[in-house]
Image (cartoon, rainbow, N blue to C red):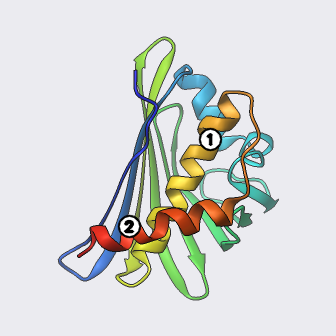
Amino acid sequence: MTTETSGTVRIEEDGTGTVRMDRVYPTGIDDLWDAVTVPERLARWLVVRLDGVPALGETVHAVFTSHWDGSVRVDVCDRPERLLVTMTSDGETTVTEARLTAVDDDRTRLVIEERGFTADEVADHGAGWQVHVEDLGTVLAGGEPEPWLPRWRALQPGYVASLS
């Protein structure tokens, strides 16, 4: 079983950027769903501050470990398979979708796709999402994530190069 992250970035025909992360985690679908939706669990790998209670149709304020700071509206919440949110920060809006698929009882695939970046931001966000999904793997294995920024700096040039 691979636990490596498959991350891609691309520029769409309309000029916007899309980030896609794909990883299989060694846990059941219900546990992974809780890790990506329950605020106390999100705090360990993604969201360091959350103002409000995330629920379908609600908007909350969030600050990520990557220092992203903005509003998140829950548009679709189909437990345990699909979460769709609209994220807005500094006047820029993107849509992020998480899809979970059980591989078997003990493994679950998570595909995260964020759409709507400007073309010059997509590589930065690709590296950022890769760090986030790796941090999720670390947390699920019982560990603590390493500092975010040095890992982002190491990954970002590869995402820039992938767009060339």
**Viewer-side residue, 163 vs 106:** 163
Q: Is residue 17 left or right of residue 91?
A: left
Q: Position of residue 80 (x, y in %)?
A: 52, 31
Q: Nearer the viewer, residue 99 or 124?
A: 124
- In the image, 72: left or right of 145? left
Query: Which-is-in-front pick, marks 1 and 2?
Result: 2
Q: Earlier in the sequence, mark 1 or mark 2?
A: 1
**Farthest residue, direction top:** 105
State which quarter of the image contains the C terminus: bottom left
**SS type, badge 2:** helix
Q: Which residue is mark 2?
A: 159
Q: Nearer the viewer, residue 55 or 162?
A: 162
Establish if 117 lies above or below 77: below
**Pointers 1 and 2 in contact (C-beta within 8 Å):** no
Q: Amino acid at mark 2?
A: Tyr
Residue 3 picture location, percent across and down: 46, 31
Under mark 1, the amino acid is Leu
Q: Judging from the image, what secondary structure is the residue with disc 1 in? A: helix
Q: Position of residue 57 (x, y in %)?
A: 60, 58
Note whether 96 is above or below 92 in the view shown: above
Residue drawn at x 63%, y 25% is 31
Q: Residue 13's quadrant in the figure?
A: bottom left
* Separation (CA) of disc 1 from disc 2: 20 Å
Q: Residue furthest bottom?
A: 91
| Quarter of the image with the N terminus in it | top left
In the image, residue 103 sits, relative to residue 99, either above or below, namely: above
Residue at left 72%, top 40%? 38
Q: Which residue is mark 1?
A: 136
